[in-house]
Image (cartoon, rainbow, N blue to C red):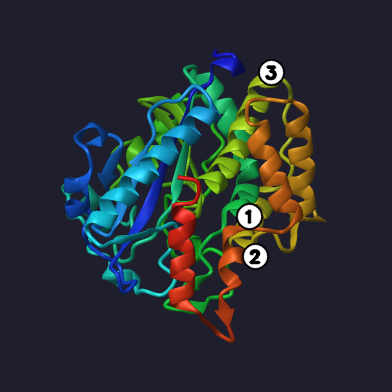
Amino acid sequence: MKTTSELHFGVEEEFALLNADGSLANEVDALLARVPDRYKPDRVKRDLHYCMVEVTTPVCDSPAAVERSLTELRRVVGEAAATLGLRVISSGVHPTAPMEQGKLVETPRFRRLIDGGALRGDGVHFGFHLHVSLDGPEARVGVVNRLRWHIPELVALSVNAPFYRGEYHDVKSVRLEYYDPVPTVGPPPVIEEFADWADVLKSFARYGVEGERDHYGDIRHRSSPPTLEVRVMDTQQSVAETLAAAAYVWALVRHYLTILDDEYLPPMTEDELAANREAAWQHGLDGVFRFYGDAVPRADYIGHTLHHLLERNTPEAPYLERLAARVAAGETGADAQLTFLESDRVDGPALLAELERKFAEGL
């Protein structure tokens, strides 16, 4: 098993490409043609829709290295977009444009998954994914079995999509509201050993799933490369916000690696996990988590966890301090977007300009 000082990290971010008028621009191929060759195909690439560009860091040995890589990759994408008169924003969904403006990238794999029901292709949305390398399959299983109970916290911290078609949908992540019905989405099941993961994947074969990369759950086991991958969070507006949310996951992984041999008692029931997760994408940091019938304010609970993680003084500490300040202030990407709400409609041009500014913040 790796020691916690030997962990390696990676992040993928998905961004929306916009035309000058703010509509979705299905121009990822044109953008990629302007990206320097050294970033292709591994670091900057297309994904499910032509209006989406995905960036992927290399394997990094520290959170600070991830920050440097994400900053560089956002700068590369922004510069390429500018040469085409395109704009780039980071939001779980485009706040004013119809999802259907996004043109699907037709591949045999995507078509298999869409036709089977394991993937939705009828609307574009944007998330970010966190990787932590864990060579030992037993360690991955033990950490994922514990990390799954933190999914409601991860959702509450990362909500960044309160608007769709210019209207507030009374939820803070339209992305998760949209994607939640997909059968593979949600917390992964608790398994006893890594070999059991193959049986989990087989149970989704009727939806078109043929392997681990076809499973779109909140957290998934990966054997190649040997990582755990957290997929539940909305794409964040700035690099700083991405790193703050990522640091929470990475610090939890470090913590659980040190206590894998200890007895672990789930903090809530399975029904409460599902209810807390849904309440988190509806309300973000507002409201309460429920634990065996008790209710604790979400911000207080996350603040308490952050306090204990900060006491460990891991490499994530500087990012966790920023996150703690945001939690204390009740700030999420969704709340920042909601400041642009006027009556029952969003000030679309102003919000898009702010999201464009935040995408480039600190680059």
Which three-letter amino acid code belongs to the residue tagged 1? Ala
What residue sits 20% from the left and 55% below the top? 105
Element at badge 2?
Answer: helix
In the rendered view, does 21 fall on the left or right side of 149? left
The CA distance from mark 1 to mark 3 is 29 Å
Tell me the crowding category of disc 1: few under 14, some 14 to 19, or many 20 or more residues within 10 angstroms, Cα based: many
Q: Secondary structure at mark 3?
A: loop
What amino acid is found at the position of numbered circle 2 in the picture?
His
- CA gap, disc 3 and disc 2: 35 Å
**Residue 180 visible in rendering:** no
The circle drawn on residue 261 is 3
Q: Quadrant of the C terminus?
A: top left
The crowding category of the residue bearing disc 2, from other C-alpha atoms within 10 Å (few below 14, some 14 to 19, many at least 20), is many
**Which mark lies nearer to you, 3 or 2?**
2
Q: Is residue 27 above or below residue 191?
A: below
Specify which label sits upstream in the sequence, 1 or 3. 1
**Mark 3 Cα shell of 10 Å, populated few (<14), some (14-19), many (≥20):** few
**What residue sits 42% from the left and 77% below the top?**
165
| Label 1 – label 2 distance at C-alpha | 7 Å
**244 vs 191: above or below:** below
Expressed as whole percent of the image width and height from the top left, the position of residue 201 reads 38, 38
Q: Earlier in the sequence, mark 3 or mark 2?
A: 3
Q: Which residue is mark 2?
A: 283
Asked whether, in this view, residue 6 is left or right of residue 296, the answer is left
x and y, in percent, of residue 324 in the image? 72, 45
Q: Are marks 1 and 2 in contact (CB under 8 Å)?
A: yes
Residue occupied by mark 1: 156
Determine whether the residue tagged by mark 1 lies in a helix, strand or loop.
Answer: helix
Look at the picture and state if 246 lies above or below 241.
above
